[in-house]
Amino acid sequence: MKKHIPNTITCCNLISGCIATYWALCGVYDVALLFIIIGAVFDFFDGMTARLLHVSSPIGKELDSLADDITFGFAPSAIIFDFLKQNAAQLLWHYMAYLAFVMAAFSALRLAKFNLDERQSMGFIGLPTPANALFWGALIVGSEEWLASSPYYIYGVLALMFVSCWLLVAEIPMFALKFKSWAWKGNEIKYVFILSCIPLLLLLGVSGLAAIIAWYILLSILTRKTT
């Protein structure tokens, strides 16, 4: 019985991603972001549960990647797509909105690489898909009016999206919030990051979550020789 528990949690992640995609395509981006966050919680606990119960399996690994691509690849792509499509001022822009789904493909590639890369046990090579999804969900929820106020916003959003696609598969080491011990020594970067997240959330609200992901990327790049 216990061998099915992690896969059940993973399926809850996948279902959360499906629900997030539905609300994204309905234009209700805050609910879509909520279900992406719920999916991230399930994603955190499925691996932990598998390790605690000693029931890790190849099928669980494949199922986890599929669920992650739905929740952290397709769902945020749907948010970008609907946002661009709803605010398209020109017919060309309407069709350009479909480029948003390129990010779902890069997310799938990122997850496939992660499954085969043995270097990512205590850190990441490239931007993790949950972080990318949270960035886009929070950015559009928190800054929707500001983004749409520019007459050329679609070019800026798509350009930033392609940068995030590159970051997903880039050979850039990024730290993970995994602790071998709780001591300050050896965990300085992680503690600095965690402490700096608090004022960003307090000052910027939902947009602060996007700022946190941007800060995570910058901090990883600045300290990559020591992570």
Image (cartoon, rainbow, N blue to C red):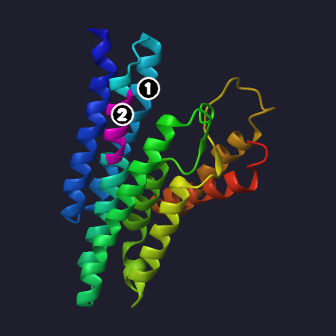
Of all residues, the one furthest to the right in this rendering is 185
Q: Amino acid at mark 1?
A: Gly
Q: Nearer the viewer, residue 164 or 52?
A: 164
Could you say where residue 83 lies in the image, as x and y percent from the top left?
A: 30, 72
Is 188 positioned to the left or the right of 30 in the image? right
Q: Nearer the viewer, residue 105 or 13?
A: 105
Main SS type for the magenta part?
A: helix
Q: The C terminus is located in which quarter? A: top right
User: Residue 94's mark?
Assistant: none
Q: Can residue 142 be seen by looking at this rendering?
A: yes
Counting residues from the start of the chain, the first of labels 2 and 1 encountered is: 1
Disc 2, SS: helix
Q: Can residue 201 be seen by looking at this rendering?
A: no
- At horizontal 58% and vertical 57% (from top left) the residue drawn is 200
Q: Does the stretch in magenta take in 36?
A: no
Could you say where residue 75 lies in the image, as x and y percent from the top left?
A: 30, 54
User: Measured along the vertical axis of the image, is residue 42 above or below residue 31?
Assistant: above
Of all residues, the one furthest to the top in this rendering is 1
From the image, tell me which residue sits under label 2.
Answer: 64
Q: Are marks 2 and 1 in contact (CB under 8 Å)?
A: yes
Could you say where residue 43 lies in the image, as x and y percent from the top left?
A: 39, 34
CA–CA distance between discs 2 and 1?
9 Å
Could you say where residue 63 lies in the image, as x and y percent from the top left?
A: 32, 32
- At horizontal 34% and vertical 67% (from top left) the residue drawn is 100
Q: Which residues are magenta?
A: 61-69
- At horizontal 41% and vertical 27% (from top left) the residue drawn is 45
Q: Nearer the viewer, residue 31 or 124?
A: 124
Disc 1, SS: helix
Q: Quadrant of residue 145?
A: bottom left
User: Residue 47's mark?
Assistant: 1
